[in-house]
Amino acid sequence: MSKMNETDLRRRLGLLSGIEPSPQAAGRALDRVRRVLSETTPRPANRLAGAGGMLTKSRLAGLAVAAAVLIATGVFVFLFTGSLDGTTAAYARVTEAVRNVPWMRMRYSGYSLNNAGNRTSGEGERDTEIWYSFNAQVVIYKYPHGAIDYYDYAKQEIHEYNPVAKRIVVSALPTGRRPFRTDSPGAWLEKSIEQITSGGGRVTREAGQYKGQETEVFEITSAVRPGVAAIRSKIFVDRTTSLPIAEERAYINTNTGNPQLVETGIFDYPEQGPADIYGLGLSRDIPTISSLPLPSWSDIRMTYEPYRFKPLAQRYVAVVTRWMIGLVESVEIFYADGTRFREERHFPYRGGNIGPQWEEMKTELGDTPDSLLRWSRDYKARGHITISLWVGKRAYHSQRDERGSWSAAERVVLPQEMTEDFWSICPIAGLAWPDIRGYADIIQDDYAREHGLIRVEGEQETFYLNPQRDYICQQRVPFGRDRSEVTEFAQTETGRWYPRKIDDGSLKYTIYLDTDPEFPEGLFDPNSLPKADREAAPVP
Amino acid sequence: MSDRRTELLELLDRSGASLHALLTRLTLRQDVAEELMQDLFLKLNAARDQGGVDCWDAYARRTAINLAFDWRRREKSRRSCSLDESLELACEAGPPLSRLIESEELEQVLAAIGRLHGPSREAFVLRYIQQESYEDIAKQFGKTPHHVRALCSRAMSALRDLVLKDGREVQHVEDE
């Protein structure tokens, strides 16, 4: 060990502070935590619901928007279903009244609650403002943290304000993805009604008051579906104008029966609305960037995200070698056979001086998938080895230390089977389709245009997605750091693309994939895991 | 989605990358940092049940620091240096051998930091490894910036003694 002086000490502290894990490692670690969290607490009914939620910038803001959609449409449901006693005329009046106003503005505020009934959100954190104009064919959402989405259905464009990057991006508005159609208010209503009624529900109507004003009160209760918050909504309609004036809404946790989100909406009908997105209070100095004719990142994300969670095959063996400074640093192997999974991580070297070990290890490893698999199955690594096995809801973990001692297999009972989650922990998923979090926009540059790529500018990184190859992130550029690039692609027999080689400067990855593998006997049998010292009893 | 999971996912989105970087800096091992990230959030999940945590970000950082140094203590007896320690450093990248030597030196500093005590160690890590301002650390600690400055100064002094002493001892052994 070297002698250290004050300067050395401070220099080394500087080096420590400058260490950054690779984006792949960080992404993998974060994905793993997400998976663990999903195993330790109730899982959402549909994983892709999160991707849909991104449309509204946040899940919580999404609830508010969903609420607004419901208020704007919920009262009309029964006009079309005609299922209520003698109220069709009343709904027709409301519909007609809303159609005839130049603008409708909805301002929602609310708060979330934990299971103990305590508020978990601060003042203003739920405030959402929504504008509609049937005549101008404009819909605007203004979110609590400053983001604004301005839908211009006449021009088929969406103008999005990104409050982090402080820019407005104009994108194409694809049909069928948004909650509203553009051709006519009638079509808009029809589509929204489909959304509301698809899950069932119940409505009552009665005379009432709202803050001293005579109203008709429509009480809407959504159908109870496991894992989905039930909605109880009261909509107050002015008896004179037939215009909705307010809504009180609660989202009920179906597990506990307690409200988890309470919102109040106030509606008014100004003569004039915002002429453009700047009319929502944005400075004219904020630049507008066009990504036309591409759609927005919110829309592209809906295509991109499923690849992250959709395995390349039901049965496969994936071997991922990670290289650093010309040495294989780790070998990871993922076996999937329907609902049985096995993950192995092999670290080739013992601690200490690596040099001589590499020369020997290079020969033992070989450079083909077969040689790597043989090497792994003979447990020839000199560093740590970890093996995890998932069979149904049971997980088994075993590890070997540098001295060659295997631990006793640890057994864990999971609340859910691994199923598609296994794919998300396989490095291929994270390397090819990294998690793009936070605010992001499509901002093309010459490189993207020349190579047919889609450039996604995020908060910390820029990603170039290849739409010709299953939206694989072909290049990834963390701000201020080396870029990571897919240098070779491969394709499965069913046509799915995946990266074959990735170079991120300091680390290089090679991926071998076999989607028609023959598994060795006992590969998924917990009793075939290496035995710990003095362990004799079979794993239960 | 449960509130707890939402809270933890929000914490993960907000601070996950930073916590992972912190764990990587303190362990010099990406694979270990990944393991400890999982442990960290399991602990946070459990702590959430028990209540009594005012600031989750600060609590998560403190727990991460403790986990990393606990791991270092466990590994101390058989750990020296592995390939993972040749992480991409912000400094100029030299040849492999010099980078490995450098990693060994970083180990020495981290071992010494591990010998500091609770708040002093935490403040020191936040200031000198996470490069946070005294003001930000003070907010997390509920103390004044002046107090944190003093805490870090004392920690630096103690660290200096530890590493210089270690260096002399090792040098002495090498001389023999």
Image (cartoon, rainbow, N blue to C red):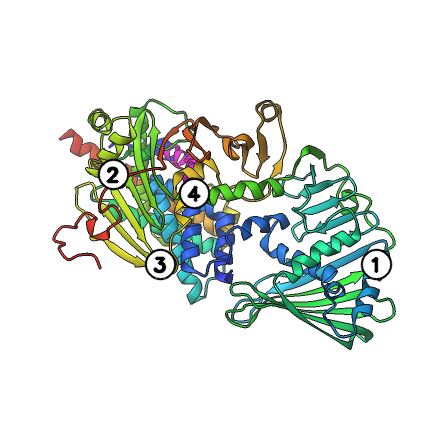
Query: Same chain for the residues at labels 4 and 1, yes or no?
Result: yes
Q: CA distance from mark 3 to mark 4?
A: 21 Å
Of marks 1 and 2, the one in the foreground: 1
Above-or-below relation of A103 to A334: below
Q: CA distance from mark 4 to mark 1?
A: 49 Å
Return the residue at label 2. Answer: B166
Marks 3/4 same chain: yes
Residues tagged by mark 1 and mark 3 found on one chain of the structure: yes
Amino acid marked by disc 2: Asp
Residue indicated by mark 1: A269
Image disc number at residue A311: 4
Residue shown at the point (84%, 49%) measured from the top left: A135
Q: Return the residue at label 3.
A: A414
Distance from the alpha carbon under mark 3 to that under mark 2? 47 Å
User: Who comes first in sequence, dot 1 or dot 3?
Assistant: 1
Residue A86 to residue B31: above or below: below
Residue B9 coordinates in the image, percent (x, y):
49, 53
Dot 1 falls on which chain? A
Using the rendered image, report if marks 1 and 2 lie on a common chain: no
Amino acid at dot 3: Leu
Image coordinates of residue A117 in percent, x first then y, are 55, 71
Please check whether the numbered discs 3 and 2 fall on a single chain: no
Q: At label 4, which amino acid type do we have?
A: Pro
The answer to whether residue A503 is magenta is no
Tell whether label 3 touches label 1 (CB within 8 Å).
no
Q: Chain of mark 4?
A: A
